[in-house]
Amino acid sequence: MLVFQRRTTMSRNPYKLPLICSREEYRARVATDPDQQLVDLADWVPGLVLDLRYATANNLAGRPLYTRAQALARRPVAVALARVQHQLAAFGVGLVVYDAYRPYHVTREFYELIGDEDFAAPPWRGSRHNRGCALDVGLVQLGSGQTLPLPTDFDELTPAAHARYPALPAHVLFNRSLLLAAMRGQGFRNYPAEWWHFDHPRWPEFDLLDLSFEELVI
């Protein structure tokens, strides 16, 4: 069984990555540049549905990995996602978020569990989730909140998860195309091995973080 716990800076980061582990350092960055702030997507994106799998046992590890069911992202990411939500409303659908900001130590544990760079960011590089600039999303029907059919379940690590996998029913292909087009229209870039994963184009501007959700409350 995986054990997720707070560790010292060195044990969390033996690769000597530039990594922010101090709440004070994070707050200093935000004070000088508001775009550095991790904001709550539920507050910034009207009608957003949350299905935060890593705050539950319904994930690859089989146990909660997060201390709080909260979807956080850098301020420009939240602004762009709100625009996606607005555009999708014309089709009677909206977004569900499965994951957003992810502390670096969880990325390390994921790689130890999966051991495949196609589906887990290696700890010597870190993840764009650790920067607050990656989102895992799907589609829901507006009003009911019912999930729309997409190629696989979130985090189902199979060939069908690839964003160009062709052997799917027509309505699933349409839903996937709708999601990809809406996200790309606001600058998000899909990671091809996972139809659900999107990176904001400004991700290089933001540091890797290993702060708990409680530490990020300002």
Image (spheres, grey):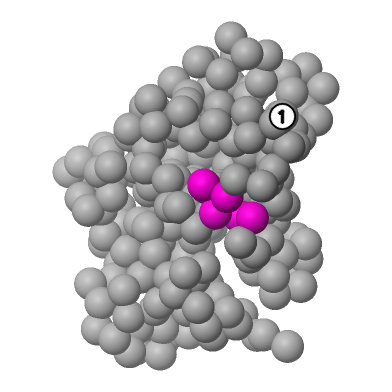
Q: Can you give x and y, in whole percent of width and height, for residue 1 in the image? A: 73, 88
* Outermost residue to the top: 90
The answer to whether residue 107 of the structure is visible from this angle is no
The residue shown at (70%, 74%) is: 61
- Tell me: 39 left or right of 172: left
According to the image, label 1 marks what residue? 171
Q: Is residue 54 above or below residue 33?
A: below
Q: Is residue 190 above or below residue 9?
A: above
Q: Can you give x and y, in whole percent of width and height, for residue 15 in the image? A: 29, 86
User: Looking at the image, how many numbered discs can be counted on the residues?
Assistant: 1
The answer to whether residue 191 of the structure is visible from this angle is yes
Q: Can you give x and y, in whole percent of width and height, for residue 155 in the image? A: 64, 60
- Residue 164 is inside the magenta segment: yes
In terms of secondary structure, what is the magenta stretch mainly?
loop
* Outermost residue to the left: 32
Q: Determine the secondary structure under disc 1.
A: helix
Q: Quadrant of residue 56?
A: bottom right
Q: Can you give x and y, in whole percent of width and height, for residue 199 in the image? A: 38, 47
Kind of residue at badge 1: His
The residue shown at (32%, 80%) is: 124
The residue shown at (40%, 90%) is: 11
Neighbours of disc 1 within 10 Å: few (<14), some (14-19), many (20+): few
Q: Magenta residues, as a range? A: 160-165
